[in-house]
Image: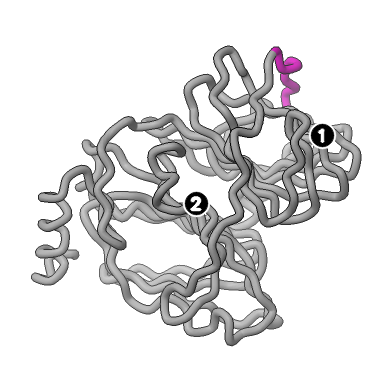
Amino acid sequence: MSTTVTHPVTTSPLVKTRGVERIINGQFVMDGAGVRINRVLTAPLQRRLDPFLMLDAFGSDKPGDYIAGFPEHPHRGFETITYMLAGRMRHRDNAGNEGLITDGGVQWMTAGRGVIHSEMPEQNAGLMEGFQLWLNLPASDKMTDPWYRDIPLEEVPRFTLDDGVTVQVIAGSTHGVDGAVQRAHTEPLYLDLEIPAGVTYEQLVPAGHNAFVYVFRGDVVIDGKGVPHTRMAILDNAAGADGVRIKAIEPTRLLVLAGRPLNEPIAQYGPFVMNTQAELLQAVEDFRAGRFA
């Protein structure tokens, strides 16, 4: 099934654009069984970028950087969105579910009340590149049943504008095109954009949503400020701003993410994200007692 959209609905020009509040370099860390990643959105930014909790970018043509993968580990209280640009990642969990994300595919997993899973890379010409985003759940949904969906490339809506900009809509909606996933509480917008050199792209962002841009190919200018590749730009929440204007200096590819903040307390202990310390202690106790099922 193809989800290529040939005639997307156009949008009106922006009235007032968001600027760049600050640029984030990210931190190179080792995670899982020794996977080298660039942690772009770190814990100190969770309140500022609520409802997003973490963004990891990974990419290497050296299998030793990633082949050990992420053996069995637990999660509770949030969602993980894994987006593979290149390579394959196999998912298995304690409920017997198994899936394989391939080039361009997405896995959207709701950990809810608890899941134990593994994420193991599989060779595909030696290249592995992609992202994992953590999206918080509201308190009312933190103990919901676990759920996940594997979304192959052909099921991710994609369209190309007249100026050559290509847009993949992983979540949310833009230009009248609905993404692969919708979420009522956090209303996430998750776009992968390819912008030709010299082209300016305008993206509507709802008022009140926290938003950021991560450039992983090329360089852009946002409201007069340069954002180079492998950098994240946190967009300001200027009153009256209805979107962001992005100009590509060279052929560029980037992520645009925005979401409605939950404005709830965040209590995190590793792979558990709850609202209180008592809930965290309960999560650890439930995991140790084998109640993640």
Tell me what residue is drawn at x 31 percent, y 55 percent.
111
Tell me what residue is drawn at x 74 percent, y 39 percent.
159
Q: Secondary structure at mark 1?
A: loop
The disc at residue 41 is: 2
**Label 2 Cα neighbours within 10 Å, binned few <14 / some 14-19 / many ≥20:** many
| Image position, residue 261 (x, y; %) | 40, 31
Viewport quadrant of the C terminus: bottom left
Q: Is residue 40 left or right of residue 51?
A: right
According to the picture, the residue beneath numbered tag 1 turns out to be 161
Part of the protein shown in magenta: 8-15
For discs 2 and 1, the disc positioned in front in the rendered view? 2
**Label 1 Cα neighbours within 10 Å, binned few <14 / some 14-19 / many ≥20:** some
Q: Secondary structure at mark 2?
A: strand
Tell me what residue is drawn at x 61 percent, y 85 percent.
63
| Image position, residue 8 (x, y; %) | 74, 29
Q: Nearer the viewer, residue 110 or 54?
A: 54
Looking at the rendered structure, the kind of residue marked 2 is Leu
Q: Is residue 109 above or below residue 289?
A: above
Q: Nearer the viewer, residue 63 or 23?
A: 23
